[in-house]
Amino acid sequence: MIRSSTERSRPLYGPAVTGDEARRPRVAIVVLNWNGKDHTKACLSSLVTDSYPSATIIVVDNGSTDGSLDMLRRDFPESATLRYISSTTNLGYAGGNNLGIVRAIEDGAEYVLLLNNDTLIDPGFLDCLVSVIEREARVGVVGPKVLCHPRRDLIFSEGERYSLWFNWRRTIDVGALDDQADHPPRDVDYVVGCAILVSREFVGRVGLLDETFFLYYEEMDWCFRGRKLGFRVVYVPQARVYHRGGASTGGEGQPLVEYYKTRNLIYFMRKHAAPYHWIMFVPVFCLSVTKRLIRAFRHGNRAAIVAIAHALWWQFRPESVYARMPPGGHETGVPPTPGYRETS
């Protein structure tokens, strides 16, 4: 709901910061928008309901052509707690969020939350995430329970385990019923990118998102890179967000989706899989691609077939062989903050 002119005189995110609240870690929330003004408007309105006192919001407009930026600036004026960044082109999930991450770090944020514009939050979720990442040693990434929207009793993600052998997410299926039990936080292989909180230390040592991915698998890659450096990735079920899913890409079967999911899975494996993983991965991957090609053929979706073919061919092109890697921590200009917990 858009706030009245009176409401707009207050900070967008939470109440005024006073006393002990001012000592809460500073969190920057990066919301990426691409031609999704209605979703972004609802997301920002949802963020107003959270009471975390030391947060700012950075809206990154990723080359939108639907008038998003003008509308958002009109309904949510820029202030000390809300800033806008505009890109002239669509840089993808990785590139657009990297703009926000760099700005957040430059502004002194201790933690950065990447939040999809097609999400709504549960009040108090940010304080819950920050409490866990502050309390637990070596944690560089935390993520909430992600529920579907509007069916909020259905699971979208409960933290993820991933098998490099079979390309399997070894967790609950999307759309399963939420048992609503009070489970404790637990270590996972990665958390989904629609809501992912990372520490300044994590960015400083691991680096930014790999922009070669552009779309899909970049958060998995980020978490895997962090785990190789000793960071823990933790799922926090007490924190909740609600995700529509496919708001920007249109979902399965779209050429954009088919291209990047196919291309980036192989690229991800090339970065992280050992030689022995390919023994099982190749036949499983070939079976999966064959099924998708048959489905596209039956539906007359020629564009999806062409997209998958282009994704496979990309693996042999020079830009794939010499794909640009993201800068390491020492190249980002983001040194670990004092008191970084290397071990417990």
Image (cartoon, helix red, strand yellow):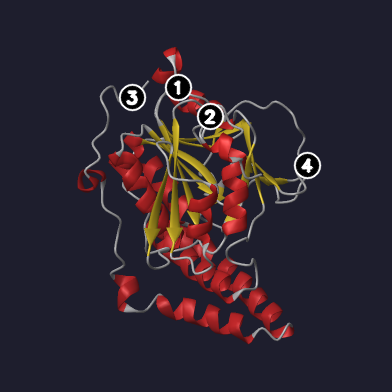
* Amino acid type at mark 2: Gly
CB atoms of marks 1 and 4 within 8 Å:
no
For the N terminus, the image quarter is top right
* Amino acid type at mark 1: Val
* Amino acid type at mark 4: Asp
Q: Rounded to the nearest whole Å, what is the CA distance between mark 4 and mark 3?
A: 37 Å
Indicate which label's residue lies in the foreground, 4 or 3: 4
In the rendered view, tell whether residue 296 sits above or below residue 196: below
- Secondary structure type for disc 3: loop
Q: What residue does disc 4 label?
A: 153
Q: Nearer the viewer, residue 178 or 125?
A: 125
Q: Return the residue found at the far top.
A: 19
**Disc with the residue nearer the chain's start (4 vs 3):** 4
For the C terminus, the image quarter is top left
**Disc with the residue nearer the chain's start (4 vs 2):** 2
- Secondary structure type for disc 1: loop
Please state the total of marks drawn on the protein image. Answer: 4
The location of residue 326, given as percent across then percent down, is 30, 55
Q: What residue does disc 1 label?
A: 17
User: What's the residue at 54%, 31% (across, down)?
Assistant: 126
- Secondary structure type for disc 4: loop
Q: What residue does disc 3 label?
A: 341
